[in-house]
Structure formats: C-alpha cells, structure tokens
Amino acid sequence: MSLLGRSLRDLWAHRFLSAVTTFAVAMSVLIVGAFSLFVVNAAGIIQDWGSGARIVAYLSPGVESDKVPLLRGEIGRIEGVAEVRYISRDAAMERLRKGMAEEAFLLDHLRENPLPDALEVSLFRPMKNWRRFAPAAQAIREIDGVAEVEFGEEWLGRFLHLMDLFRLSAAGMGGIFFLAAVFFMANTVRLLLYARREEIEILYLVGATHSFIRLPLYLQGMLHGIIGAGAGLGALYGAFYLISIRAPGVGTFPIRFLSEEIMGGILTGSVLVGWFGTYLSLKRFHR
Amino acid sequence: MSLLGRSLRDLWAHRFLSAVTTFAVAMSVLIVGAFSLFVVNAAGIIQDWGSGARIVAYLSPGVESDKVPLLRGEIGRIEGVAEVRYISRDAAMERLRKGMAEEAFLLDHLRENPLPDALEVSLFRPMKNWRRFAPAAQAIREIDGVAEVEFGEEWLGRFLHLMDLFRLSAAGMGGIFFLAAVFFMANTVRLLLYARREEIEILYLVGATHSFIRLPLYLQGMLHGIIGAGAGLGALYGAFYLISIRAPGVGTFPIRFLSEEIMGGILTGSVLVGWFGTYLSLKRFHR
Amino acid sequence: MTPPEKGPEPIIRLFHVHKRYGAKAALIDISIDVFENEFIFISGPSGAGKSTLLKLLYLGEPVSEGHIVVDGLNLSRISRRRIPMLRRRIGIVFQDYKLIPTKSVYENVALVLEALGTRPRLIRKTARSLLRRVGMEEKAKALPPSLSGGEQQRAAVARALAGNPKIILADEPTGSLDAEAASDIFDLLRECHERGATLLVATHDTALIRRTGGKVILLDRGRLDVTTTIPKLPA
Amino acid sequence: MTPPEKGPEPIIRLFHVHKRYGAKAALIDISIDVFENEFIFISGPSGAGKSTLLKLLYLGEPVSEGHIVVDGLNLSRISRRRIPMLRRRIGIVFQDYKLIPTKSVYENVALVLEALGTRPRLIRKTARSLLRRVGMEEKAKALPPSLSGGEQQRAAVARALAGNPKIILADEPTGSLDAEAASDIFDLLRECHERGATLLVATHDTALIRRTGGKVILLDRGRLDVTTTIPKLPA
Ligand SMILES: Nc1ncnc2c1ncn2[C@@H]1O[C@H](COP(=O)(O)OP(=O)(O)OP(=O)(O)O)[C@@H](O)[C@H]1O
Ligand SMILES: Nc1ncnc2c1ncn2[C@@H]1O[C@H](COP(=O)(O)OP(=O)(O)OP(=O)(O)O)[C@@H](O)[C@H]1O
Ligand SMILES: [Mg+2]
Ligand SMILES: [Mg+2]
C-alpha cells in the first residue's frame, strides 16, 4: 500500500485524535492570522495618515520666482526627497483659509497677505523615513534662499512615540502569539503521538524500519498542519468578511485581508510545525 | 487517602500529560491576557486623547459679562455636561497664538482682536459620551446669547469611525481569542483524559462510584486551570515589564498591567474551563 | 421473570439470555441458575463465549435479549447510578488483568478498598496480607508493565479478592501460571469459597478442572453444551 | 568472544549474560548456544526470567553484562539503524500479544509483510492463508480489542510467522488456548521447524512440553537450572 494510502487510513483509524489535532492547528492559525490581519490593517491606516506628512520650506522674501527651479533641483537632490512642489503665497493663503475653517473670518481682517512663497517637500515612503524628516529638514534649511523650514516637529515626535509603542507591542504580542501557536501545535501533535505510542512501539518490535514508521507519521503531521491551517484561514476570512461589511475602510484606506504571501507563509509554517511536532515527539521512540 | 492527596498523586503519576495540559492552559491565558492588555491600554490612550474634546460656544457680540453666570447655569443643566469654563476674547487670542505656533506672526498684522468671548464646555466621561456631542452642541446652540457652537465635527466623525473599527475588531478578535483559548484548554483536557481512558474504565469496572472517580479528575482539571493560568499571567507580566520599561506611557497615560478584576476573571475562567473540559470528556465514560 | 421456584433463591440467574455483537451471536439462549456458595467452572474452546458470559454478569456488556438477575438486582432494569453497587459485590479477575498501568501493584489493590470506603489502616493491612498470600509482597511497589505475565495475573487475583466480595468471577485466573503457583491461587479461591463466596471460574484448561473437580458449565460456540459435575481426581 | 568451537556455528549464542532491572537481577550468568533448526523450550516458574531471556534476543531490552550474538549480529555492538534488520529475521509471539488495537487482524498481519517490502498480491495471499491456518479467517476484519483471549493469541502467532522468519521466539504461544487449538498451533510451529526455522518457546506448561518432547532449558529465579531433552510422550 502506498505511503499516502497508509497515512490516510491511519488518519481515519485515529479520527478523534486527528480531529482534535487539526482543530488545534486551526485555532492556532486563527489566532496568529487574526493578529496579523489586525497589524496589517492598522499599519495601513497609519501609513495612510502618515503619507500626508510634508516638510514646508518658506522662501526668503527677496527670492524671485525664476530662482525657484534651481532651489527645487537643489532640494530634490537631498536623500529621501520624493517630490518638491511650489506653493505661491496666494495658494498658501487659500489653504490656510480652508484649514482654519471656522476661524477663517479672522483672515478677513488682514491688510495684506503676510505669507511667504513656499516649497512643499514630500519624502519617499514616509512610513519608513519618518526618522529622516529632521535631517532632511536641516539640509533644506541650510540652502540659500530658504528662510524657514517647518514639519510639525512636535506632532511628529508624539506620533513616532506612538508608532514605537504600537510596533513594540505588536512585535511583542505577535511574538507571543506565534510562539504560543507553534508550541500549541507541536504539543498537540505530541499528545497525539503519546496516545499512539503503543502502536509505534509495536511497529518497531516487528522490525519495521525508521522510515516505514516515521514517514506516514510525518505526512500525517503535515496533513494536520495544512488542513488545520486551511480551516483556520477559512474561519478567519469569515470573521473578516462579517467585520468588513460593517466597516469597509478608514480614510482612503480600504480594510484588506491577509496578502497571499502571508497566507502562504501561514500554510507553510503550519506544515513545518506539524513536521516539527512530529519530529520532537518521535525523538522519544528510539527503537 | 484524602481527595486532594489522591488528586496530587495522580497528577504526579501523569506528569507528562499534566505538564502538557498546564502548558496549554498557560499559553491560552497568555494569548487572551496579551490581547486584553493591548485593548485596555489602547482604550486608555484613546480615552486620554478623547478627554481633551470640548464644545466651544461663542457668545453673541452684545452679551455683557454679567449675563455669563446665567448662561453657564443654563448650559450646565444640559445632560452630560460636566464643566463650563468662561474664556474671554483675550484669553482666546492668547490660546490661538500658541496653537498656531509657527504661523502666529500672522496675528501680529491684526488691527484688533476679532474673537468673541466663549464658553468652553466639557462633558462627563467623554469616551462614553461622544455620541452625545452633537445633541449637546445643538442644545447649547439654541440658548439665547450663544452665537455659534464648534466642536470639531469633522474630526469627531472620523474619530468615531476609527473607534468603531477599533471596538469592532477588538471585540471580534477578543471573541476569537477567547473561544480559541477555551476550546484549546477543553481540548487539551480531553486529550489528557483520552490518554487516561483505560485507567478510568478500569476504575468503573472495579466498582468505584461516579464521585470517587470524577471528583479527583475535576479537581485535577481545575488545578491544571489555575496553575496554568498563574504561569500564563506570570509570563505575561514578564513580557509587559520588558515592554513597559522601554515605553512607560503615552501622553498623560501610563501603560498599565491588567486590573485585579481582569486577572481574577482569567483565573476563575481557567478554573471553570478546566472543570468544563473535564465535564465534556467524562460524558463519554458512562459506566 | 418466571415465578420463583421452590428451594433456595439462586444468587445468579440467567433467563434465556442472548448476546450478539453486531450480527455475530456470542451467546445463544443461555439459562443458568447459580446458587449461593456454588463453585462453578465455565469451560469451552477458544471463542466459545466464556468471557462474554462473565461480562454480562458485571454489566461489562449489556444483554441483547433475556434477563439476568444478580444478587437480587435485575440487570436489565438497574439504573446507571446503582451499577457500582452491583460491582462492589463482585470480585473480578479479568482475562487481560486490567491493572492500572500507572499505579503500583499495592495501589491497584488498595484502590478497590478505598473505593469501598475502608479505613486507611485496614486498607494497608488487607492489601499487604493479600499480596503476601499471592507471593507478590516483594513486587508491591512495582508498576504492572514491569511485571512478568504470571506476576500480573497474581496481582489481578489479589485485587479481585480485596473487597471480600460475595461473588467472584475469575476469567482464566491461572492461565499464565506454572502448576505450583496455579494451585496456590486455587487454594486461595477455595478459601474464599469456604468463607461463603460464590465462584464462577472460566477456563479452557480441562486438566485443571479434572485436578480440582466441581460443577462445570460447558459452552460451545455460544450455546450451553452440558452441565456436569466432575469428581476431583485423586492426586 | 570465545574463539569459535568446532562443529556448526550456533545461530544464537549467549555468553555469560546478566540482566538487571535496577537492583533486581532477572537473569544471572546465562550461557547458552542454540544451533540452527533447533526447537527449544524455555521453562520455569512465574518470574523465572523466560520472557526476559527472549526480550534480550530481539533487543527488547539491552543486556546488563555479557554478550549475545544472533545470526551473526553481535547485539552489544549493533547500531540502532540495523536493529530492524535483526528483527526482520525473527518472528515473535509476545506474551501479551502486542496487537495494534486500531488495526484489524488482517492489517496486523499484513503490516509485517509491508514492512518487509513484499508485493501487495503476495501480502494478501500469505496473510489470508496464515489466518486460515490459525482458524481466524472469519475474524480477519475484527479489531483486536473485540477478540477473545484465545483469538488474540492466534492472531499474534499468525503475525509472528508472516515474514517466514529464520528464528521464531514464542512466549507462551498457547497459554490462552484450549488443548485442541493449542495442538493446532504447535503443529504450525512444527511445520516452521521442518522448513528450517530455529524455535525458542517459553512456557510454564510442563504438561505441554511432555506432550511434545524436545530440548528444555529450565530457568529458576534468573539462573540456568538444567538443560535436558525430554522424549515425546506416546499419545
Ligand atoms: N466486543 C466484541 N465485539 C465483537 N465480537 C466480540 C466482542 N467480544 C467478544 N466477541 C466475540 O465473541 C466470541 C466469544 O468471545 P469470548 O471472549 O466470550 O470467548 P471466550 O470463550 O472467552 O474465548 P477465550 O477462551 O479465547 O478467551 C468470540 O468469537 C469473540 O470474537
Ligand atoms: N521492565 C522491568 N522492570 C523491572 N522488573 C522487571 C521488568 N521486566 C521484568 N521484570 C522482573 O524480572 C523478573 C523476570 O520476569 P520475566 O517476565 O522474564 O518472567 P517470566 O519467566 O516470563 O514469568 P511469567 O511466566 O510470569 O511470564 C520478574 O520478577 C519481573 O518482575
Ligand atoms: Mg475469554
Ligand atoms: Mg513471561
């Protein structure tokens, strides 16, 4: 009888244990998957916010508009800078008026437009480059013709602190969840093989080789892994669907399911853990 | 021999299985605990932000300062209102100057202070009462002597949406984690008793009563629950400590560990699940 | 049930009992009366139904048809809660011993007494003297998987007798023992008989029956073949 | 090892073998030579060390002292990878049967052949004919826990013989069988002997030995007591 045939027959003979094991894997995957989903979407939302972050360089009062292209070029050469846009004093006033909303009537009392011309600088991949805002701003400040540089230093500081906290706790929790899931699966496989130890010992006694005994067990461990992971991801998708129809997105960011890479990783990981749990348990059976 | 004595002797006789079970409980508790910790702290941080939310009622130009106490009283009677503070036009200008920071120089060009006097209204427990901002603002608007009401409607809308999303996903994930943990523990206890079924069947055959057989098993299930939960909470505190020394807090909000109530709930819950898992498994043994 | 017959009431009564496992009939229309303090052998070839017959008596299996009364308890009607009551009156030597593998020989014996609610002192005394009696005092602390076949069997006999049961069901109680040890065990069983117990001993070993003598119920492929009394052979 | 003696090389050789379980000595200074195609009984009372002796031969337990050579393999030096090779040459009837409880009788037998890499067709043929031979063809699909004691034993014998082993170690192979079934099994073992196998049969049943006749190794509390040859009784 083929290896796969033997393995499947065995799964059926131990269907209670197999069901429990598969269920354990599914639950583990559900937990890690739910958390990944959460982190991926939270990161997306934060990224969405963060992509609005800009450095504004106010030009010195005497700078003529024909010098602007030169300044743009100079700023564009600074590391991390993605785009430089010219904002005239009139455009800036219009923006300010919009930004102040309810208090915009204050601006009606102005005698003349006191705003300077400005260049708005955005960085490549701001999420990753937030820590470069300060050095980039410094570099821009040193350019001739730039009077003042502004980038919401205080706001950014707070935001970075929060991001750090989020990253740290996500990493911490992710680590805990991942380890817990791995241990769970491995442990469940161990319990499974503990319950089957008699059978395994008998096989050794009647002269079956290592590979004859172990290959089906490994295959079964991996099958438990992949079936459980599939079921877990399926359940997660169900939960995700129920949530996402109630809250489809935030800002311009649509809530998404796990990427194919992550799903692939989870499936592969589960298979590996099934294998690994089997490996650990079988180390007790020497002969 | 006493019930406890028998139970402990049994635990020792099955130390491998007991260790695995306790470990499973600890992991379950770790997962649910880590998530609770995250939600509790995230909610605290959001609460901290949210407590800054205010309704500003601008007074009509003609209102004399001796009418202010009357208005305060009237506003104070509106449901949910906690505090009403008077902000004179000069104080408002000072604040605006601070708030605008870099652009404050604009205000130097003003001929006179165009700001009105205002009353700043804060609500009781803003976290819970956000949805009351709009009706409260409406009620204030209708009061004689109030010209305009402002409370960052757009910002609040977004914020509420985000909060909804957070709540929804926290509830969804919490539910998933909780169920997963309960199933895990119950399942592990089932596997444990599956591995011990021979012994249990023999006890029935030699005439032991239900209670003689089951009480120690229940006690053991509950011991697994409480020991595992204790270990899980201990490990969680370790992880928490490592994170909290790197990031002690955000804003005015200090990162905290789980409250005693939640810890008590987790311990009680684990004991119950240990009991319940035993109950489920024992239903298979009828005689 | 049939109306009670004259004379003493039987302690075990099988009335047209059938036992089927799926389609396979393991016992067919068995009616037996066993009276108090009888010593009966159940014999027959492998697969005849000896163990099944004993299992029915302690409700290890339910009957398929017919009725069984054991010590006044109608087994077809007994409630689940009262099954332990039935089993406490019966000492069973299982063919496959059924010792708890994670408990020592001593604990296996003591557990029966604990379950009966015996005082700890008496438990120690009874368990020790029984183990001495079957020649297992040196192995009291050993776990069953580390015992030889015969040792396990002797431990199983000691456990069956621990509660001083009214009825003793022994399934091949000396199958793994050499002649000398077997006759020791039989002496022990006979002592129980003398103290008033009713014994049913299943065995395929006709030589043993001939050596001991007694009433024999012969089964063949699930049917009651004959019931005879074989005289004890002169040694 | 001692230098080879004259005459044929023994297929099994025990050289001053000791076996201790913790402090307890189960076998003490045993030296035995078994030659190809011998049929040897190992006898002795319960706990004498019969099963332990057989366990040492298939490396179910390691020796504590001394050396054992089985079919040219020195068991003290054999690498773990080669243990299956040793066991494939040996057919074992375990005292407690050791049937896999989740596999049918047929599968238990077929598995040995699968492990040897036999072709599926031949597996079917061999397994079926062996089960017929021990009177278990009707129970081929049954799971071991649903078999009677004697049926389990017959299945265990069938499995031990499936691989057509050179050496057969049988631990009480007829302990749970009635006289008729037992003599069937012995006929089967004798056929294997005639086809060239070497047999070691542990039993406490001296009557059986006397019925069959043959070379007997007698153990007593771990020591080699005597080695005699008992002539077959006229039936
Ligand atoms: N749980 C079961 N399921 C199916 N068949 C069973 C079960 N238990 C016993 N049998 C069958 O019932 C028949 C009688 O079994 P039983 O164990 O009573 O025989 P026995 O007389 O004790 O034999 P032995 O001397 O070999 O122990 C056998 O053929 C057996 O296979
Ligand atoms: N794994 C073990 N651990 C400790 N002691 C053991 C172990 N296996 C066997 N023994 C002891 O070694 C002695 C010999 O055991 P063995 O099983 O060889 O006896 P045996 O001759 O086969 O007896 P029987 O006829 O009862 O089967 C016994 O006293 C037994 O208790
Ligand atoms: Mg039987
Ligand atoms: Mg033995």
Image (cartoon, coloured by chain):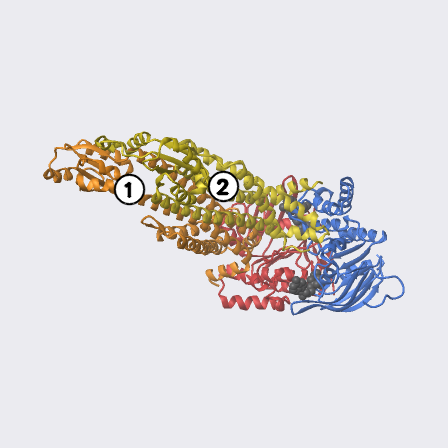
Chain colours: A yellow, B orange, C red, D blue
Cα–Cα span, label 1 and label 2: 44 Å
* Contact? badges 1 and 2 (CB < 8 Å): no
Residue A253: x and y, percent? 42, 33
Towards the viewer: A213 or B211: A213
Residue A242, horizontal then vertical, whole percent: 44, 33
Taking B158 as reference, is B5 above or below it? below
Q: Amino acid at mark 1?
A: Ala
> In the rendering, which numbered label is found on residue B101?
1
Few, some or many residues within 10 Å of mark 1 (<14, 14–19, 20+)? few
Q: Which residue is mark 2?
A: A33
Mark 1 chain = B
- The percent coordinates of residue B151 (x first, y second) are 26, 36
Along the viewing direction, whichever of B58 and A103 lies nearer the viewer? A103
Q: Residue at x 54, y 69 (%)?
A: C125
Give the x, y percent position of residue C200. 63, 55
Q: Determine the quadrant in which ligand 4 lies.
A: bottom right
The reply to the same-chain question for discs 1 and 2 is no
